[in-house]
């Protein structure tokens, strides 16, 4: 049908009020969606897009901690790497026991590729040349999850990630699409509301040395294990080869720069380990992680501790803030255990 | 495929819609709707497309046979029997085989005998209950000479496979669609699209925002039903009462709206059922397409109310018992159906006296009876129903204090209030006088985008998909 005929048909159809209504509806639906997507990026309540116009509700910590380390103008001899489970490893205590100035560079959802990227960034972009890196690993880090979007979306780390531009673009689109959810909308509202009023006292923040601020008297939440830890163990029991490779590269890079690596497996309550053993491939993955890390230790590349069970470091069964995160008490005990036996050569 | 999914909203529907209206020829439109209906159905499991095709083909040919032998009752009955045996046979096999063998073994065990009961791994094809009833109504109506059998296979297959009503109704009769099928080659009119769009978006809101939000709260509660308090048990059943209504009526609105977008007028399926003044009234308002099917093809052929009162009560009871069984192969559905059958029989007996009761009390009483029935409808087994009802009626433990009500969830409490206002005071979707004003377009667009956002959180199937 010729275009002119189409146009005449369209004009005839459009005369009706209902047609105008429908067109208006379609345009507004697209318009509203675009506005929400733009707001998602601008408000960035989870710090994923890095716009930093409003403080995120959920701190990803990457931007904050990388900036802190970039601006560090004193020697930093010891860095703590790891996920949110390491947030309460106290740099002050570490310095007291080891004599080394310490920064806690742990970030949420940290994975082996993140440790590698972060070390490359620090060595190439900052003046930081640590003598020791203390890495807290949890077995689930070696699962089959894709690279964490928060890491991909961080411009400082992205350049050091083994990822193509296409993958970055797809991650950005997926992250944008995931922002169209009621939880994200709620976080956007909270970010705007708190920035105008006052941030809640129990919001996660960090000291200048990267240590998490927290209320020691806050009630713990030991309700039924969250689903998230169960989801981590999505392999058949084996460790993901790419994740192992990233970690091996991280260790090699550290060795090349004469940086000592101390690795420990982070603890969980016995009840949680028992449930993971029953419901997931945790036991097999844990055994494979022990084998892998022991081999690295045997090659003198790392010092390795398995602190999965609290008994291994004389820890406390209730020394956890929830079903997976060690409290400051257990982290202090781990720090003492490591530095009572470790000697810097 | 479900209506509340991205693949449907942004891929399947736009393509189906645009191509349909680009086609001008009637036959081409029949073929296109048949094809897209099979794609829609096959998205779930392509193997069961063959089953639906088989049922469609058998009933198409059976109707032709019946009409060809009009006047010869025996031949007509053969044709009808083939249709009924095929349709019901497949339905019974796929849906009730394990249930019936289990029930038979259970009955035999009462006599002290132990039968080894086989358990077959049979996948229940979705919507088989719905399209079986539709194909049966077609052949029965041809047999009764209410309609003429169509000689156009694709016209008939459009009636069965047209995707809006395919999966979970409304259960349509061929007479419902004859006019629209005959005029399928009509020109598009903006009035169709306008009304269809409004119905579809409102249905989407009912399902995605209201029903699914309630479900997210009460499902975990009912997952641990043994730990419910009395207050929790009541909150859960009220939540489920509204969840079921908004889920199913929302789906029906979407189906009817989608039908409008293609120029079809489907029958309404809900008419403020929770405003019913007695149980008979409830069944004139709830899942209307099913209740009218049961009335026309089961209750009336059994004699209806034209026989003795005791036989009428029995007919009511049996019809509803089978209606309960239609919903699923579980004794809880049978109990639910029997419960409603009993209520209908009692209502028929005492209805002359009920008129003296104030309307508000009639509505409250009917609502109460209906929600008791939903306990069985929702329960996985009789044990759960028993525990749930026991908790509900441990009345000294019922705490109506504000703090107890919101202890489970403030969100649930708010949703219950909103739901009550909607079902008791607001008009049905089909009763709204839609105005093509631009401010309403903005409101509808905002509602649609809100649904898209909620969909990103969850994409849950409709409750009636499992039937």
Image (tube, coloured by chain):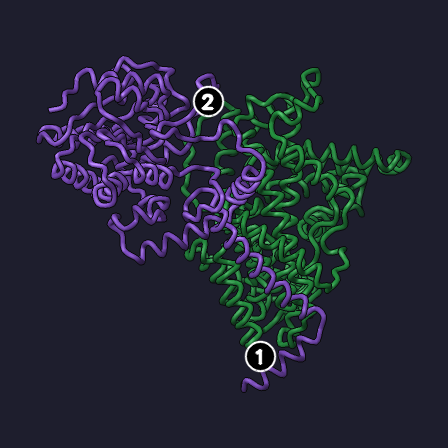
Chain colours: A purple, B green
Q: Nearer the viewer, residue A45 or B392?
A: A45
Image quadrant in which you'd find residue B81? bottom right
Task: Give the side of residue B93 with respect to residue B290, left or right.
Answer: left
Letter of the chain that mark 2 sits on in the rendering: A
Where A148 sits versus B108, above or below? below
> What residue does disc 1 label?
B24
- Is label 2 on the same chain as label 1? no
Where B330 sits versus A180, above or below? above
> What residue does disc 2 label?
A221
Q: In the image, residue A309 lies at what x, y percent?
A: 28, 19
Badge 1: how crowded within 10 Å, few (<14), some, or many (20+)? some
Q: Nearer the viewer, residue B395 or A160?
A: A160
Task: Identify the residue at horizontal 59%, vertical 64% (top origin).
Answer: A27
Give the tally of numbered discs. Answer: 2
Q: In the image, residue B384 lies at what x, y percent?
A: 56, 27
Label 1, secondary structure: give it.
loop
């Amino acid at each position: 049908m010729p275009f002119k005929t189409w146009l005449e048909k369209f004009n005839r159809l459009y005369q009706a009020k209902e047609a105008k209504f429908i067109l208006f509806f379609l345009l507004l639906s697209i318009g509203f969606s675009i506005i929400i997507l733009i707001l998602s990026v601008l408000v960035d309540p989870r710090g994923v897009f890095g716009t930093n116009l409003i403080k995120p509700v959920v701190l990803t910590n990457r931007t904050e901690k990388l900036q802190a380390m970039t601006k560090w103008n004193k020697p930093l001899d010891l860095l703590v790497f790891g996920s949110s489970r390491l947030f309460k490893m106290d740099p002050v205590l570490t310095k007291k026991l080891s004599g080394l100035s310490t920064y806690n560079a742990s970030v949420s959802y940290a994975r082996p590729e993140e440790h590698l990227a972060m070390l490359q960034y620090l060595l190439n972009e900052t003046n930081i040349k640590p003598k020791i890196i203390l890495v807290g690993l949890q077995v689930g880090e070696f699962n089959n999850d894709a690279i964490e979007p928060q890491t991909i979306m961080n411009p400082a780390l992205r350049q050091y990630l083994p990822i193509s531009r296409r993958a970055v673009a797809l991650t950005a689109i997926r992250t944008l699409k995931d922002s169209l959810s009621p939880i994200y909308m709620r976080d956007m509202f909270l970010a705007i509301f708190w920035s105008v009023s006052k941030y809640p006292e129990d919001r996660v923040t960090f000291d200048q040395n990267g240590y998490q601020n927290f209320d020691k008297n806050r009630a713990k939440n030991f309700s039924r294990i969250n689903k998230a830890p169960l989801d981590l163990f999505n392999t058949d029991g084996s460790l993901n080869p790419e994740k192992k490779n990233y970690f091996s590269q991280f260790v090699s890079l550290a060795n090349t720069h004469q940086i000592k690596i101390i690795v420990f497996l982070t603890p969980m309550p016995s009840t949680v380990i028992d449930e993971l053993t029953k419901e997931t491939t945790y036991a097999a993955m844990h055994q494979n992680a022990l084998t892998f890390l022991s081999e690295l230790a045997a090659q003198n590349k790392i010092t390795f501790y398995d602190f999965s069970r609290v008994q291994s470091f004389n820890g406390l069964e209730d020394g956890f803030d929830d079903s997976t995160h060690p409290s400051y008490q257990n982290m202090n005990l781990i720090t003492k255990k490591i530095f009572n036996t470790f000697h810097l050569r | 495929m479900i209506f509340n999914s991205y693949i449907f909203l942004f891929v399947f529907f736009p393509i189906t819609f645009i191509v349909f209206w680009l086609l001008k020829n009637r036959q081409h439109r029949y073929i296109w709707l048949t094809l897209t209906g099979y794609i829609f159905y096959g998205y779930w499991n392509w193997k069961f497309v063959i089953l639906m095709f088989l049922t469609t083909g058998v009933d198409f040919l059976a109707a032709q046979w019946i009409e060809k032998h009009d006047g010869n009752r025996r031949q007509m009955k053969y044709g009808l029997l083939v249709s009924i045996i095929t349709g019901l046979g497949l339905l019974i096999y796929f849906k009730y085989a394990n249930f019936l063998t289990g029930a038979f073994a259970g009955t035999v065990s009462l006599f002290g005998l132990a039968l080894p009961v086989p358990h077959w791994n049979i996948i229940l094809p979705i919507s088989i209950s719905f399209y079986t009833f539709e194909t049966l109504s077609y052949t029965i109506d041809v047999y009764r000479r209410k309609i003429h059998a169509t000689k156009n296979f694709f016209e008939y297959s459009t009636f069965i496979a047209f995707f809006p009503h395919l999966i979970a109704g409304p259960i349509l009769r061929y007479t419902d669609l004859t006019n629209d099928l005959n005029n399928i080659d009509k020109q598009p009119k903006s009035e169709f699209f306008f009304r269809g769009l409004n119905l579809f978006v409102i249905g989407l809101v009912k399902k995605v925002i209201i029903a699914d939000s309630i479900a997210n709260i009460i499902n975990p509660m009912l997952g641990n039903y043994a730990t419910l308090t009395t207050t929790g048990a009541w909150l859960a059943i009220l939540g489920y009462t509204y969840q079921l209504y908004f889920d199913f009526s929302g789906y029906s609105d979407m189906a009817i709206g989608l039908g409008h977008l293609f120029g079809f007028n489907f029958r309404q399926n809900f008419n403020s059922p929770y405003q019913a003044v007695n149980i008979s009234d409830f069944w004139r308002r709830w899942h209307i397409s099913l209740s009218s099917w049961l009335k026309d093809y089961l209750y009336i052929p059994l004699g209806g109310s034209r026989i003795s009162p005791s036989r009428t009560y029995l007919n009511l009871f049996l019809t509803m018992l089978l209606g309960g069984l239609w919903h699923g192969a579980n004794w809880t559905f049978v109990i639910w159906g029997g419960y409603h059958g009993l209520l209908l029989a009692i209502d028929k007996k005492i209805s002359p006296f009920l008129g003296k009761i104030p309307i508000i009390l009639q509505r409250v009483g009917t609502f109460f009876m209906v929600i008791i029935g939903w306990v069985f409808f929702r329960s996985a087994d009789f044990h759960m129903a028993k525990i749930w009802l026991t908790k509900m009626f441990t009345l000294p433990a019922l705490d109506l204090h504000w703090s107890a009500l919101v202890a489970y969830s403030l969100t649930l409490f708010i949703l219950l209030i909103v739901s009550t206002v909607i079902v008791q005071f607001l008009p049905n979707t089909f009763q709204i006088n839609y105005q093509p004003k631009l401010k309403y377009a903005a409101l509808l667009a905002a509602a649609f985008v809100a649904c898209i956002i909620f969909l990103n959180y969850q994409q849950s199937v409709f409750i009636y998909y499992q039937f």
